Image (tube, helix red, strand yellow):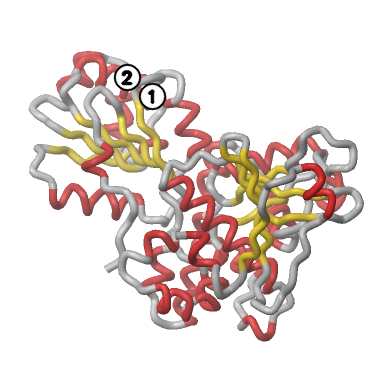
Amino acid sequence: MLQRYYQIDKLLQKKKVLVIYGARRVGKTTLLKSFLENTTLKYKLDSGENIRVQRIFSSQDFQLINSYVEGLELLAIDEAQQIPNIGMGLKILVDQNPELLIIATGSSSFDLSQQIGEPLTGRKRTRILFPFAQSEIIFVNTKFEMSEKIEETLIFGNYPEVLTSRTKKSKIEIINEIVDSYLLKDILQFEKIRGSQKLFDLLKLLAFQIGNEVSIHELSKSLRIDSKTVSRYIDILENSFVIKKLGAFSRNLRDEITKKNKYFFWDNGIRNGIIKQFNELENRNDIGALFENFVITERLKRNHYNQDYSASYFWRTFQGGEIDYIEDKDGKLTGHEIKWSPKSKFKIPNKWKIYYPGSPVHLINSKNYLDFVL
């Protein structure tokens, strides 16, 4: 059985709300219920979609909120982003009930964090749950088994339901359902975005450009909307765990590119679902981009779960020198060039060696990638 990296019992802390964010369908509710099924604590599980719960927490009525948790050791609220002013309600609980353990899950960080952030300053622990990471799958599979499935992973990704589905048809059906029904649900609901088609068109453009530098101006021209709106949409997509921005590394050198970003999808299956391409790798022309997307996001998941706070970038000069992925940890730089084929060669750009002497660059390929993402 697949296991998640997080063990909720080890994350719970009195006087702090445990907040678990993540995209829809990544397994937050399953993780929560699995913990509750095995706890000896006296608990209550409620949903933020429950109108009664919404009324209680949005009331900011001390007596009403305290009576709601009377006699409990643990309160768990799933879909907490649905509750207006949830942060103030949870603040009241924490301050009035210091012995009570509290968990809140939410599928939409941009909304939940705005409501929770300020009221719960110093009163919360935050974790993000992603689609399954390779560092979680290793709990139940060997490295050999994982490497045998790499082509399938690059095409279908690692959403829980996709991983447990046995046929290609069922995997595609699940991905299409997530893309069509859930991917933008929170964004459209909470951000009141009317141009849902423009938002989806933006996702398509980004899906075709993974691994490439993206110009906001060019996206704006293609979509026929202003650059500020494009930037806003991208921020929302990132904050709702659809995409991840990778900025350019530079120490203010004149020939290093700094103004463009790259955008990667947290899940390969979602990326392929957006452009409706599920054909085998041998029939694709984007294998390199798929592998780069996979390796970088798996590394970022691994770093998040291990609380490794390295800063992440790509590097490129105007003369064409490029390194796919850079980590800056305590001022020490390490570069990584990502190539699907083990036969691919790579020469470290001279400018990198001149500007950043002693900063190694490693070649990551389909044979050695697991050592990098586990």
Measured as percent of width and height from the top left, residue 188 is found at: 57, 44
Give the side of residue 340 with respect to residue 37, left or right. Answer: right
Q: Quadrant of residue 93?
A: top left
Residue drawn at x 61%, y 83% as measured from the top left: 280
Near-viewer residue (95 or 336): 336
Residue labelled with disc 1? 87
Spot occupied by residue 64 in the image (x, y as percentages of width and height):
21, 19
Question: If the image is split into quadrants, where does the C terminus sit?
Answer: bottom left
- Element type at mark 2: helix
Residue carrying label 2 = 91
- Between 358 and 222, the one lying in front of the other is 358
The answer to whether residue 349 is above or below residue 76 is below
Against 308, residue 280 (above or below) is below
Q: Is residue 198 left or right of residue 156?
A: right
**Looking at the picture, how far across and down is residue 298, in whole percent?**
52, 58
Q: Amino acid at mark 2?
A: Lys
Image x and y of residue 311, in percent: 60, 40
Residue drawn at (38%, 21%) of the image: 120
Residue 192 position by quadrant: top right
Residue 180 visible here: no
Pointer 1 and pointer 2: residues touching (CB < 8 Å)? yes
Q: Residue furthest front?
A: 358
How many numbered marks are there?
A: 2
Residue 247 visible in the picture: yes
Q: Amino acid at mark 1?
A: Gly
Q: Is residue 314 left or right of residue 182?
A: right
Q: Quadrant of the N terminus?
A: bottom left
Q: Which residue is found at the position 68% from the left and 43% from the top? A: 234
The residue drawn where x is 37% and y is 27% is: 86
